[in-house]
Image (cartoon, rainbow, N blue to C red):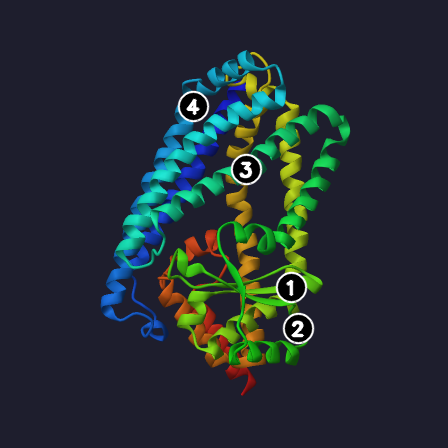
Amino acid sequence: METFIVLVIFSFLIVNFGVNLFLSILNYKNRNAKIPEELVDIYDMEKYVDWKNYYMENFFLQLISSSINFIIILMFLSLSIFNKLYTFATDITMNVPHQSLIVIGFYFLINYVIDLIFSYYSVFTIENKYGFNKMTKKTFIIDKIKSLILTIIFGGGAVYGIVQLYLSSGNLFFFIAWGSSILIMLFINISYTKLFVPLFNKLRPLDDSPLKDKIYAFAEKVGYEISKISVIDASKRSTKLNAYFSGFGKVKRIVLYDTLIEKMSEEEIIAVLAHEIGHNKHKHIIFNLIQMVLMLSIYMLGIMIFLDNEVFSLAFDFSEISYGFNLILYMIFLSVVTLIINIPLSYISRKFEYQADAYAAQNYSDEMLISALKVLSRENFSNLTPHPLYVKFYYSHPPLKERIANIKSLKKDKS
């Protein structure tokens, strides 16, 4: 049994790395595919060459990063480094949750340092080279410190809470952990823009302007209530564009990147917002909440299985169960499960995007929506020719060609 578990864990590691590598290579090779005729106006030739170089550099950076992380986890497992960490932790404290924090925390720290190095190179070499980065080194350092603190608070708190709850709640662990996770996720979703975004960015109300008047006029026309429209200083870090909705019910809020306002026409911005309103009108938010609850149920069941069985630790030569180590094995197991589950979930998400596009096209303007999607693709250096298999695994949004074709088919059906 123990030998079988070792083989399964190593197999899961290799499968996860191998599938991701295979799909990434497929997608990388597809960068030279012919651009669809309806998308040729997005990049001029010089810009398109820049995009391919940008994509190439990011691909190799990600390849090196993922390979190093893969080698590290293999070394930690093969050389019994986790065992040594656990012995070190037990020498320091007899508190089991604290032991788990030491084992997981050290492994996290190694990965954090590696990610920090690659993130720095990505921002100040690649993003700088292609004109995307607006972040100073001071801002980068402050962001990383804040992110580390939040990770320690929430990630460390989650590890400590799960282990402590498991040890103290007995048969009620699953239900308490499941219910608590749902409440925490809802809290984060509702309060994200109000509490967490200001830690990194400044939000200001959208100034009184024709754009603001048009947004409220369209929202009123389609029966969508907006409590607040905010502008985020995204240009402090990047030139890339985005917009999103947050909150539920009476606290629905629109957040616009200042770069979006700068580079899109008022009509294009409203088309983007009409798309987001379409998600609400089609009850996608409710579906996503139900999906979140179901996924949390699966995750908590998996955690309970790994915490319940000392055989996972014994298989890797531990003398007793190490809850921290078992949770790391669970994350390895979860990586492959997530890879598989992501296929149907991504499919559903792409279907939702088609529905939201249709809503925006029918209730506002199909031409403005197509124009807005092209601006987003151009300014964000989107891949115009992703490999179909890569799309099935990773794309929550359909490729631009398919979105435009779907929008145009609505006009044909209407005529």
Question: What's the CA distance linking mark 2 and mark 3?
Answer: 38 Å
| Mark closer to the observer (2, 4) | 2
| Mark closer to the observer (2, 3) | 2
Residue type pointed to by label 2: Tyr
| Mark closer to the observer (4, 3) | 4
In the rendered image, which residue does mark 3 sit on?
Answer: 334
Residue type pointed to by label 1: Lys
Residue type pointed to by label 4: Phe
In the rendered image, which residue does mark 2 sit on?
Answer: 224
In the rendered image, which residue does mark 1 sit on?
Answer: 252
Question: What's the CA distance linking mark 4 and mark 3?
Answer: 18 Å
In the rendered image, which residue does mark 4 sit on?
Answer: 76
> Residue 168, image x and y in percent?
73, 24
Instruction: Find out whether the residues at labels 3 and 1 contact each other: C-beta distance under 8 Å.
Output: no
Residue drawn at point x = 48 percent, y = 18 percent: 85
Screen quadrant of the C terminus = bottom right
Instruction: Find out whether the residues at labels 4 and 3 contact each other: C-beta distance under 8 Å.
Output: no
> Residue 385, image x and y in percent?
35, 62
Mark 2 surroundings within 10 Å by alpha-carbon count, few (fewer than 14), some (14 through 19), many (20 or more): some
Per the image, label 4 sits on a secondary structure element best described as helix
| Mark closer to the observer (1, 4) | 1
Image quarter of residue 169? top right
Residue 252 vs 319, above or below: the answer is below
> Residue 124, image x and y in percent?
30, 49
The answer to which of marks 1 and 2 sits earlier in the sequence is 2
Residue type pointed to by label 3: Leu
The answer to which of marks 1 and 4 sits earlier in the sequence is 4
Closer to the camera, 66 or 21? 66
